[in-house]
Amino acid sequence: MLDAVSAEATMSQYPLLARIQDPVDLRALSSEQLKQLATELRAFLIDSVSRTGGHLAAGLGVVELTIALHHVFDTPHDRLVWDVGHQAYPHKILTGRRDRMHRMRMKDGLSGFPKRSESRYDTFGVGHSSTSISAALGMSIAARLKGEQRHVIAVIGDGSLGAGMAFEALNHGGPLDPDLLVILNDNEMSISPPVGGISTHLARLLSSQVYTSMREGSKTALRRMPHLRELVGRWEEHMKGMVMPSTMFEELGFNYIGPIDGHDMDDLLSTLHNMKAMPGPRFLHVATQKGRGYEPAEGQPVQFHGVTPFDAKTGRMHKKSGGKTYTQIFGDWLCEAAAVEPRLLAITPAMREGSGMVAFSERFPERYFDVGIAEQHAVTLAAGMACEGMKPVVAIYSTFLQRAYDQLVHDVCLQGLDVTFAVDRAGLVGADGATHAGSFDLSFGRPLPNFVIMAPADENECRRMLQTALEHPGPAMVRYPRGAGPGVEIDLQAGVLPIGEAELLRQGRHVALLGFGSRVAPALEVGEELNVTVANMRFVKPLDERLILELADQHELLITIEENVISGGAGSAVSELLAAHGLTVRCVHLGLPDVCQEQASHNEQLHVCGLDAPGIRAAVLSELADLGLDPQLNSALARESA
């Protein structure tokens, strides 16, 4: 890891960047100096992320655009809103956080995404996609109502623009005539023809003061001649439509300019200066290259989207230790199950690589559906497939399933449709922080009717649960954590699990630990040391009521342990069951506290929450002391007490 001293020492390689402590500094630079700054910023970004890991390719693609935006606009008075935030590292470097980049995505360090509490230049906290236009529109409306003169700019990627929320904002915003500039960073999806000389010339022309004055002046002159005004308006849109990708944005009320080359600093500066002076809602289409300026990232932009530390010279990633991840286990199972079950269809909302579906997409392309960043559509699409007798599997991160909650409730569970949800990144996610943590899925899934919820304790159980969900004739969710499991060997012959049946792992005294999913392994470790009972609950819904009631009858204390918020989670379900039967046995819940977990390593986060083995052990000892129970549970505890 690069410490602060060595980080500052490296700045001798970047003499111009070293002078930039604030965007005010770069506004004094000439066009040629800005080009040199772009070269230095790109090199610094590669060096920095190679040491810490993080998001790289997207940021490399917007280096020139980021510089141009901060040069032309008076940020932070003018509001700059980034979508998702993967591309915001250059923005962070230029806005006073360069010397903290060595702590990117680490405990007490910089967030991997724009964050309002981190900098006044981060005008809106992001992490999920397609929110920028809505947020920027809200800021523009607020400024107008308060009588404040400021520009508001939203930067959104082509993938994010495909989500319904972005179009909802465009549809609403155009007629309101806000002072809003939406910039489409088109870096991969090929929604437009390649940038050429004619397109660039047209963009300069249409954004120029002369054209804008003529356009606005003609509107005034033709106000009393509606038929002629309509004719001229149609001619203008027809001419634009002949040489531009689409007049769709014009139909939504935005003055469309572009596409322009997002790596040509002169074109960017000229067009942005012109568009800054234009009134009303504007839409600038900028073509960029993801991974620009770094050959490994240019050749493999998906692989270099989010990276672990790597060799900056060769682009080789440092090898990860550990066994198979839960994501890989899901990917293997998906292919194996599809080979046997022809009705299996797989859906992902733009997370093929992250969800482990590359092999499936190649082996079963006609049964693979990437719907783009459209989580709501993904879930209802699956519901429609299930209506026709298919067996859809929706592979989705826990944090992204939140965006399709109404569809999960109304379109799947209320109708009892046969949809399997493979929910990855459940629980804490380490460096990605609060925006990507899967902290709530047990709580929002538990109230839903007809919904089976499973949480595997290990790799083999994950595979069995996925098959159980697939064969269950109704909606079912398997939620598993990021990364590798405890290292249990997978038994390909193991069958499905009986719905709602837990597993008693060991019998002990006084205390029963009820572990859910990822917390079973540390619970068992503590159980062995302190000689307490441990159960692998497996199912959050339905619970194994028989086992819970037996444990309540045999023990003075039950402790539930889950990697989900305590409120409404699996532990709450246990307490509700005990209350329904009039049982007063003490029940303590260990889980995620009622705060947003900031970025840190996964182990650090678990430790802070008291969900690692030492934390569970401390909780058991504390509760025993409070209840006045004999702490001499076994020889190991006796030695500890002494």
Image: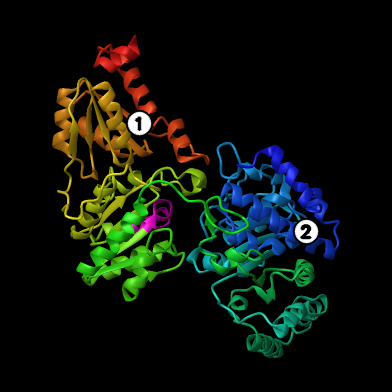
User: Which percent across, then down, holds residue 240?
Assistant: 67, 85
- Can the viewer see residue 551 in this picture? yes
Q: Residue at x 47, y 49 (%)?
A: 436
User: Which region is colored magenta?
Assistant: 396-409
Foreground disc of the pair 2, 1: 2
Disc 1 element: strand
Q: Residue at x 76, y 56 (%)?
A: 149
Q: Earlier in the sequence, mark 2 or mark 1?
A: 2
Within the image, what quadrant is residue 70 found in?
bottom right
User: Which percent across, then down, holds residue 28?
Assistant: 86, 56
Q: Is residue 310 left or right of residue 320?
A: right
Residue at numbered disc 1: 590
Where 428 sits versus 70, above or below? above
User: Which percent across, then down, holds residue 84?
Assistant: 55, 57
Where 220 sits versus 329, above or below? below
Within the image, what quadrant is residue 259 found in?
bottom right
Mark 1 Cα shell of 10 Å, populated few (<14), some (14-19), many (≥20): many
398 in magenta: yes
Q: Spatial distance from mark 2 to mark 1, Cα to Cα?
A: 50 Å
Disc 2 element: helix
Under mark 1, the amino acid is Leu
Residue at numbered disc 2: 37
